[in-house]
Image (tube, grey):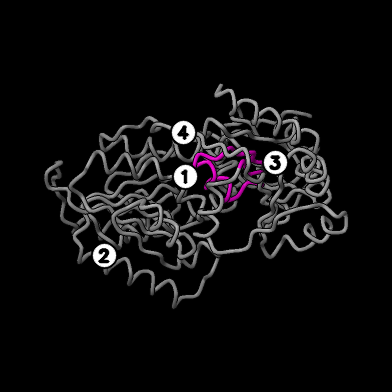
């Protein structure tokens, strides 16, 4: 594949990068794009328009900031910390080490986690923070309803009554930083990959090419928190449990082909018990397994029931989605299947985690800036089956 260098990240540079990604080119850090976090964390078009909007609104917020009161903080007077992570359940699980580190650094502070409604019940069950609040954030679903945006702004302003000392957002999203500005904490901390540095009291440059958890730990290191990963959970291996398949994904570009799941179940069922998590997308896979008369347990239940059931199982095999992060959090061995997206940025973390991905970078023409169904389809079932044998051996020998 030819190597292309793009010099400059303005309108032309970002547009060119976006078109090249769609045509199957893989952009490396040498291009300079990754140094800004343009690829593959955010869509280049999103980066471009966010920075344009940031530039346009800067004068207004700069003027408003002139009248904001400045504060002097020390460890003794930090009593309320607000953490915003309201995109997906997996995102919340990835900042669990961050929440633990903050609680160690500020044991007297009341730690509030603001997350999406889907993650609320799980975050409370796992006791990730002193208080967990689930809200509907319209921009996470690309909802441009003015009413919903005004409602979210009202929620942010209500937090002013709690006198938030420190508020943190880890995404580097202009819309998230806008939300924090309306909270008006004494100190706000966040990345500015999409612009909006004027929304924070302490804006920080976005570290590209870094795993989401490590990136979040780096951010709180500015508060004196330990930026190292916390001790990993001890691996739990239940030899009599099921090897759990999580095949479902809301985006088919992120999914592994149905026939490959069936063939993998056929291969593994000779030596292991197999279970599959039922989701709206798993119907065709389950039907094919029944047609082949495979003995497969079907789990059906809510998120908390899934957590309770999962922690007694042998292993989870899944695509890049929430269950892999939950299994890793619980200490269950995980095999996570990635396509064209970079697993080094969002893979489940844990000693007993194996990542399966194509042997070569994506070279397909695709209609998504990051995901590629052809890359997922290129992953051989035998490769996954071999990874199962290897991972079980490692866990048993505790290597």
Earlier along the polypeptide chain: callout 2 or callout 3? 2
**What segment is highlighted magenta in the picture?**
314-336
Image coordinates of residue 247 in percent, x first then y, are 70, 52
Circle 3 Cα neighbour tier, 10 Å, few/some/many (<14 / 14–19 / ≥20): many
What is the C-alpha distance between the residues marked 2 and 3? Answer: 40 Å
Earlier along the polypeptide chain: callout 3 or callout 4? 4
Front label number (2 vs 4): 4
Find disc 3 in the rendering and name its residue.
340
Residue sitting at 52 percent across and 50 percent down?
90
Earlier along the polypeptide chain: callout 2 or callout 4? 2
Find disc 2 in the rendering and name its residue.
159
What is the C-alpha distance between the residues marked 2 and 1? Answer: 24 Å
Q: Mark number for residue 94?
A: 1
Mark 3, secondary structure of its residue: loop
Residue sitting at 30 percent across and 56 percent down?
112
Find disc 4 in the rendering and name its residue.
234
The image shows residue 178, relative to residue 202, as above or below, that is: below
Q: Can residue 229 be found in the magenta stretch?
A: no
């Amino acid at each position: 594949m030819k190597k292309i260098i793009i010099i400059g990240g303005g309108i032309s540079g970002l547009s060119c990068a976006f078109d090249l990604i769609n045509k199957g080119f893989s952009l490396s850090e040498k291009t300079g794009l990754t140094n800004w976090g343009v690829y593959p964390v955010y869509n280049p078009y999103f980066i471009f328009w966010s920075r344009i909007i940031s530039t346009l609104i800067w004068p207004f917020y700069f003027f408003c900031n002139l009248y904001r009161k400045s504060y002097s903080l020390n460890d003794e007077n930090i009593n309320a910390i607000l953490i915003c992570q309201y995109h997906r359940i997996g995102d919340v699980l990835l900042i669990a080490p961050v929440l633990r580190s903050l609680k160690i650094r500020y044991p007297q502070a009341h730690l509030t986690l603001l997350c999406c409604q889907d993650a609320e019940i799980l975050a409370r069950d796992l006791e990730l923070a002193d208080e967990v609040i689930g809200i509907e954030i319209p921009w996470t679903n690309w909802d441009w309803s003015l009413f919903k945006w005004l409602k979210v702004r009202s929620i942010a302003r209500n937090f002013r009554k709690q006198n938030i000392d420190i508020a943190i957002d880890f995404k580097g999203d202009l819309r998230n930083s806008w939300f924090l500005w309306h909270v008006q904490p004494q100190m706000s901390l966040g990345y500015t990959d999409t612009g909006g540095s004027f929304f924070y009291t302490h804006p920080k440059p976005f570290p590209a090419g870094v795993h989401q958890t490590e990136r979040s730990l780096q951010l709180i290191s500015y508060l004196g928190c330990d930026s190292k990963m916390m001790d990993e959970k001890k691996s739990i291996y239940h030899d009599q449990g099921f090897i759990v398949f999580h095949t479902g994904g809301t985006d088919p570009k992120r999914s592994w082909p149905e026939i490959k799941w069936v063939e993998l179940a056929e291969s593994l069922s000779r030596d292991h018990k197999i279970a599959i998590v039922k989701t709206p997308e798993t119907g065709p896979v389950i039907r094919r397994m029944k047609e082949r008369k495979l003995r497969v347990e079907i789990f059906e239940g809510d998120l908390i029931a899934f957590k309770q059931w999962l922690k007694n199982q042998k292993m989870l095999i899944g695509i890049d989605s929430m269950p892999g992060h939950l299994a890793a959090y619980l200490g269950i061995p995980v095999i996570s299947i990635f396509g064209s997206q970079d697993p080094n940025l969002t893979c489940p973390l844990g000693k007993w985690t194996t990542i399966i991905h194509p042997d070569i970078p994506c070279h397909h023409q695709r209609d998504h800036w990051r995901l590629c169904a052809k890359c997922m389809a290129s992953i051989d079932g035998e490769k996954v089956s071999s990874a199962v044998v290897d991972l079980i051996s490692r866990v048993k020998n505790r290597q």
